[in-house]
Amino acid sequence: MQLFYAPEITLPEYTLSEEESKHCVRVLRMRTGEELHITDGKGNMYRCKLVNDNVKHCKVEVVETISEYEKMSYRLVMAVAPTKNIDRYEWFLEKATEVGISEVYPLECDHSERRQIKDEREEKVITSAVKQSLKAYHPTLHPMTKFRDVVTTPFEGDKFIAHCNDAFGERAYLGSLLKKGADTLILIGPEGDFSEEEINFALANGFKAISLGKERLRTETAAVVATVVTSTINKL
């Protein structure tokens, strides 16, 4: 299956963007009459036939629409502090999209080493992962958001904060607390971990402290592990 992303797709015919047209004709070498798929990122998967293989303006005809294609039974929101090395954060965005995620909040924390990201660049990373992993839902990437703003944003579901500060006592393993089908929000801190003030603030606002295992993980690894554990529990 060749998947293209077109959030503004129109039916019954649609013309791919110049970038996607070039990819279709020059890279994939597709020709008139061949079949491809398009997603709008909102859960719709469109089976299409290529009716004009123009290198700048490929036109397709929608043959079939599949609604809520492989829709997840839960909503997973990951709030993760961007890493100093942005490549590591982009690795998280890519892998989390492949596994299954609903929203991402780049967190600005007390110990953050990176307080800005390039939204357009990170959107492209997510879009590429959507197409590669054949997803019909495009995760929402929020702007960089302060820790306390995320914590106080209303969320109807289970809320967790992963931290490494032993002064706060023992932390339960995430997998033992997750409920199948439950909406979930998970906070992952920067390389220097959350500050004590941040941990206290999250706990006071209904978050539960969690562990992701005995290993000491990098920020981006912890975020991917949390995504995978949540996905696994929901597929049991």
Image (spheres, rainbow, N blue to C red):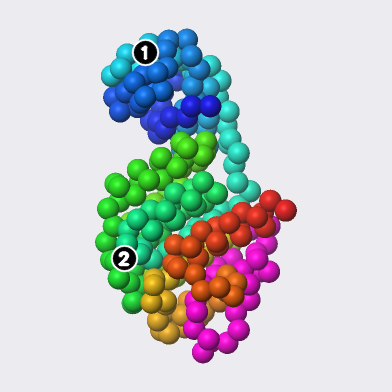
Indicate left or right for 119 with 130 as reference: left
Kind of element beneath mark 1: loop
Kind of element beneath mark 2: loop
Q: Amino acid at mark 2?
A: Lys
Spatial distance from mark 2 to mark 1, Cα to Cα? 43 Å
In this rendering, is residue 15 above or below 130?
A: above
> What residue is at 65 percent from the left and 55 percent from the top?
232
- Percent x, y of residue 41: 46, 38
Of 28 and 199, the residue lying toward us: 28
How crowded pointer 1 is (Cα within 10 Å; few <14, some 14-19, many 20+) is rated as many
Magenta region, residue range? 158-182
Residue 142 is drawn in which quadrant?
A: bottom left
Of 148 and 138, the residue lying toward us: 138
Indicate left or right for 131 with 169 as reference: left
In this rendering, is residue 208 above or below 184?
A: below
Indicate left or right for 32 with 182 as reference: left
> What residue is at 49 percent from the left and 76 percent from the top?
163
Residue 30 on the magenta span: no
For residue 84, the mark is: 2
In this rendering, is residue 34 above or below 223?
A: above
Q: Which residue is mark 1?
A: 53
- Percent x, y of residue 25: 36, 19
Q: How many marks?
A: 2
Q: Amino acid at mark 1?
A: Asp
Question: Outermost residue, right direction?
Answer: 236
- Percent x, y of residue 226: 55, 62
Question: Could you tell me if the residues under marks 2 and 1 are in contact, i.e. CB atoms within 8 Å?
Answer: no
Of 15 and 83, the residue lying toward us: 83
In this rendering, is residue 43 above or below 160?
A: above
- Percent x, y of residue 114: 29, 66
Tell me if I can see residue 46 in this picture.
no
Residue 9 is drawn in which quadrant?
A: top left
